[in-house]
Amino acid sequence: MRALITGVTGQDGSYLAELLLSRGYEVHGIIRRASSFNTARLDPVYEDPHKPGTRLFLHYGDLTSGEQLTSLMYNIRPEEIYHLGAQSHVKVSFDIPEYTGDTTGLGTTRILEAVRHSGIKTRFYQASSSEMFGSSPPPQNEKTPFRPRSPYGAAKVYAYWLTVNYRQAYGLFACNGILFNHESPRRGGTFVTRKITSAIAQILCGNQKKLFLGNLDAKRDWGYAPEYVEAMWLILQQEQPDDYVIGTGETHSVKEFTAEAFGYVGLDWREYVEFDSKYVRPTEVDTLCADPAKARKQLSWKPKLTFPELVRIMVDADMEAAGLCPVGEGIQILQVRFSDWHRWRISRLDAVQSHEGVAFEKECA
Ligand code: NAP
Ligand code: GDD
């Protein structure tokens, strides 16, 4: 099988590439040109393209331009496309709404049009988001109305409907995975969970005294990212294209995450956390909590890891990345409970290297 991943350098894209490679796929990823290395999350699966049998290939492209996407589709001829690329930060989308609409909304149109014009037969996955539900009260499922509360959420709603439209209008096997928040040691450092766990490691090292946060009362349905890329794969293996909500069905506040993470290393969060209005959004999504019944029934997908386990994995990874000896419960949870394709060594590698960047991009130039 041959798959194309947009956003392959991101949290989900890197885990998905690993999953697909472990299942024998040839994996093609689209990366954008940057002045510094942006492929560190792929280091664990990097293979020298000069070696025979390499199955990971990277191609330059940008979602803000349809220029080369059709020829990329035509030349690669992917049997599955996972469209994960996006400006994915909700708060940032208030600062750059037009760019967010271009990348996160119109980017999907450009990929879908490239599929149509290249004439290839493929299956398409759109990375839809629980942020689309906005102010709709929990629990949220496939029938819950979208009431987005951010430019990012609105752009994702547009991309959601484009995906449905191409399914109906052109018979494309196009699916939406409506994923609730999912985290990992590879989460970008400006999302709240990773911001908290990396701050804890820095506080323990003596490099940081305070952690500034915004709204501590917001509630999210947080899961573990590697389990969510397994759901993406399952969605594209069904007989019929469809849309699915993916989440744990449990919700916790930012305050609860903070208390759990600090408590794990024996610290009282109230001594370190301070409020900064800079991190408050003009409009907030108060509570997200999935009703994942459809995914459980039709995909047989059910997350294995719990909220305290997720917190432990992330704190351990950040402690190790900072050169500290981790508490260790998170490491053990992964070793005992997770599938073969994903092990602690791989998460840890990334946590350490994401700060460094490794000479990989030169292979694609
Ligand atoms: P992420 O870590 O922010 O990764 C985003 C990816 O998109 C990166 O590879 C990024 O490239 C790429 N990208 C951004 N702008 C681009 C552009 N103009 N052209 C080409 N590529 C571009 O996001 P994630 O957490 O892995 O999420 C993956 C997808 O799922 C996103 O669409 C996100 O909106 C959606 N989603 C995420 C969650 C979640 O909780 N994680 C939940 C629901 C939906 P660089 O590495 O070069 O920046
Ligand atoms: N980022 C951030 N930084 N968020 C903070 C902070 C802070 O200092 N303080 C409080 N928060 C609150 C936010 O206001 C929000 O309610 C919650 O923490 C989670 O924020 P993020 O981690 O930035 O995630 P998000 O829920 O806005 O968006 C993520 O999940 C969506 C799915 O629901 C992103 O991954 C999106 O791409 C994804 O679609």
Image (cartoon, grey):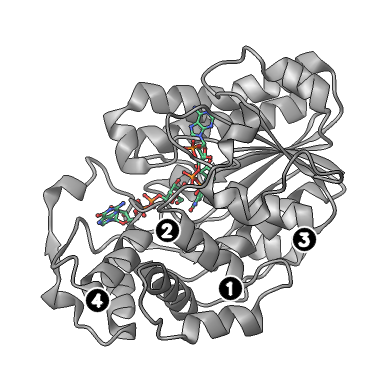
**Residue carrying label 2:** 288
Q: Kindly check if marks 2 and 1 are in contact, taking CB atoms under 8 A apart as contact.
A: no
Instruction: State whether label 2 is within 8 Å of ligand 2.
Output: yes
Q: Residue 65 lies in what quarter of the image?
A: top right
**Residue carrying label 1:** 344
Give the mark nearest the N terminus, 2 or 1.
2
Identify which amino acid the numbered label 3 is placed on.
Gln
Measured Cα–Cα span from mark 2 to mark 1? 29 Å
How far across and down, in percent of the image, does residue 141 sit? 57, 55
Q: Secondary structure at mark 4?
A: helix
Measured Cα–Cα span from mark 3 to mark 4? 45 Å
How far across and down, in percent of the image, does residue 209 sit? 13, 68
Camera sees residue 143? no
Q: Kindly check if marks 3 and 2 are in contact, taking CB atoms under 8 A apart as contact.
A: no
Identify which amino acid the numbered label 4 is placed on.
Leu
The numbered dot on residue 275 is none
**Residue carrying label 4:** 204
Give the mark nearest the N terminus, 1 or 3.
3
Q: Residues within 10 Å of mark 1 (few under 14, many from 20)?
A: some
Q: Secondary structure at mark 1?
A: helix
Give above or below for 211 relative to 35.
Answer: below
**In the picture, which quadrant includes the N terminus?**
top right
Identify which amino acid the numbered label 1 is placed on.
Trp
**Residue carrying label 3:** 298
Of tags 1 and 3, which is closer to the observer?
1
Q: Residue 263 lies in what quarter of the image?
A: bottom left
Residue at image position (77%, 13%) is 117
Residue at image position (24%, 76%) is 204
